[in-house]
Image: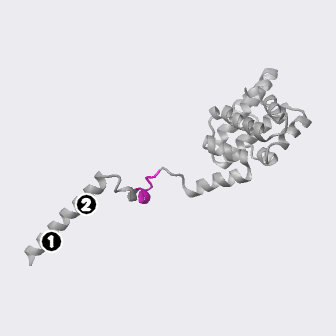
């Protein structure tokens, strides 16, 4: 009986080892392991639904999220920061025309992160007189993007997405107003 148990134990161990080796050696047959251990490259359902929800509620925010790989708060804060700079550089009526063409402009402006007036690049430039105030808009954008966790290299692509959105959906001349308002960034 002991001989039978020993033989059975050895056969079972060898079989399990062979099966394990086959699963590891053949990734096609081990694809079910990806689902268990998270090896697939698909976005989680929550992340996909956040992008889809943002695209439905605000198509401009959805475009920024999907094209630049940002989350909703980053996209809203980044767009709001750009709108804030445009607001500072346009007349009230021009900015009103621009903001009327951007869905949720007030909400985007409220998503701009609070920045300390004496910190970061914008704080330094605020102490540099007229030249500093001319560059302060760019510095404020960089400081806000940094606080939002967005690379400053995404400023120009975000502007282009907003520009393309206005070309397709905005009122006449709103693209020109956006570019005029963001002239200090370009």
What residue range appears in magenta?
34-40
The label on residue 8 is 1
Name the residue that disc number 2 marks: 19
Name the residue at 70% across, 40% down. 78
Q: Secondary structure at mark 2?
A: helix
Label 1 vs label 2, nearer the camera = 2
Which quadrant would the C terminus be assigned to in this image? top right
Q: Does the image show residue 48?
A: yes
Q: Does the image show residue 116?
A: no
Q: Is residue 39 left or right of residue 174?
A: left
Q: Is residue 61 left or right of residue 1?
A: right
Task: Residue 43: give x, y in percent of width and height.
Answer: 54, 52
Name the residue at 15% across, 66% down. 10
Relative vertical location of residue 103 with respect to residue 183 in this rendering, above or below: below
Q: Please identify the residue farthest to the top as the structure is shown.
A: 131
Q: Which label's residue is closer to the chain start, 1 or 2?
A: 1
């Amino acid at each position: 009986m002991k001989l039978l148990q020993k033989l059975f134990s050895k056969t079972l161990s060898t079989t399990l080892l062979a099966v394990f080796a086959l699963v590891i050696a053949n990734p096609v047959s081990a694809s079910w392991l990806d689902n268990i251990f998270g090896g697939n490259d698909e976005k989680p359902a929550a992340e996909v639904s956040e992008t889809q929800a943002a695209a439905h509620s605000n198509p401009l925010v959805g475009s920024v999220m999907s094209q630049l790989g940002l989350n909703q708060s980053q996209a809203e804060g980044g767009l709001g920061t750009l709108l804030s700079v445009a607001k500072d550089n346009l007349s009230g009526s021009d900015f009103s025309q621009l903001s009327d063409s951007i869905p949720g402009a007030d909400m985007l402006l409220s998503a701009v992160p609070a920045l300390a007036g004496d910190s970061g690049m914008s704080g330094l430039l605020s102490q540099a007189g007229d030249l500093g105030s001319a560059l302060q808009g760019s510095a404020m954008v960089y400081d806000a993007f940094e606080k939002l966790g967005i690379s400053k290299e995404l400023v120009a692509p975000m502007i282009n997405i907003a520009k393309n959105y206005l070309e397709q959906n905005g009122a006449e001349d709103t693209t020109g107003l956006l570019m005029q308002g963001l002239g200090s960034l370009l």
